[in-house]
Image: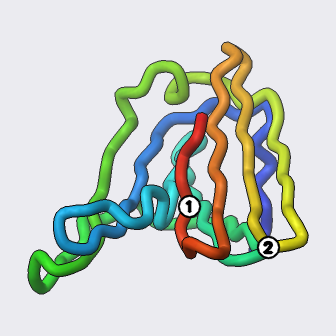
Amino acid sequence: MGEEPLLVGQRCTGFVLQHFYQGQQITDQVNVAYLRFGEQWYRLYFECATIFWRASEPPEVAENADLTHGLLLNDLSGMESVVGQTVQAVAYEGSESGDVRATLTFANGKRLEFEHSCEADSTRLIG
């Protein structure tokens, strides 16, 4: 949903993950993935049977009311295997149960694979 950005041939210039935590445990590793290409940020996020892309402002640190649950930002813009690399391919997969996967492959061979589980209602980074 939203408008998928044309990423093939674009160089990644920023990468931030937003995690959701409950208590002392991260329960949704990729609540939102923020990816920047040039000066434009994009949000990549998931629901059952749906992958969303949205143009975005830069990610901002969330304000949480207490430690029982909330959001955390993990700035991975120093991850040289992704940031500074050019996207070679983008692929999507889905299952009958509604699980979805988005894979970004970079020219250096590195892959970012985001996998959303409907049953767990969470997304994880597996590559």
Name the element at disc 2: loop
Residue positioned 30% across, 65% down in the render = 60
Query: Would you identify the image quadrant in which residue 47 lies?
Result: bottom right
Q: Is residue 102 left or right of residue 95?
A: left
Check if mark 1's residue and mark 2's residue have beta carbons within 8 Å: no
Q: Residue at x 89, y 71 (%)?
A: 96
> Which mark, by number, is residue 19?
none
Q: Which residue is mark 1?
A: 123
Picture coordinates of residue 74 (x, y %)?
31, 49
Task: Tell me: residue 121, above or below residue 59.
Answer: below
Disc number at residue 98? 2
How packed mark 2 is, by other alpha carbons closer than 10 Å (few <14, some 14-19, many 20 or more), is some
N-terminal of the pair, mark 1 or mark 2, is 2
Q: Is residue 52 above or below residue 12?
A: below
Which quadrant of the figure contains the C terminus?
top right
Q: Position of residue 13 (x, y in %)?
A: 51, 35
Left or right: 72 in relation to 43: left
Is residue 1 in sight in this rendering?
no
Count of residue discs: 2
Which image quadrant is residue 49 in?
Answer: bottom right
Say whether residue 43 is visible: yes
Q: Position of residue 5 (x, y in %)?
A: 76, 55
Mark 1: secondary structure: strand
Amino acid, disc 1? Thr
Q: Amino acid at mark 2?
A: Gly
Label 1, residues with CA under 10 Å away: few <14, some 14-19, many ≥20: many
User: Could you tell me how far apart the alpha carbons at marks 1 and 2 are, in whole angstroms?
Assistant: 13 Å
Q: Quadrant of the N terminus?
A: bottom right
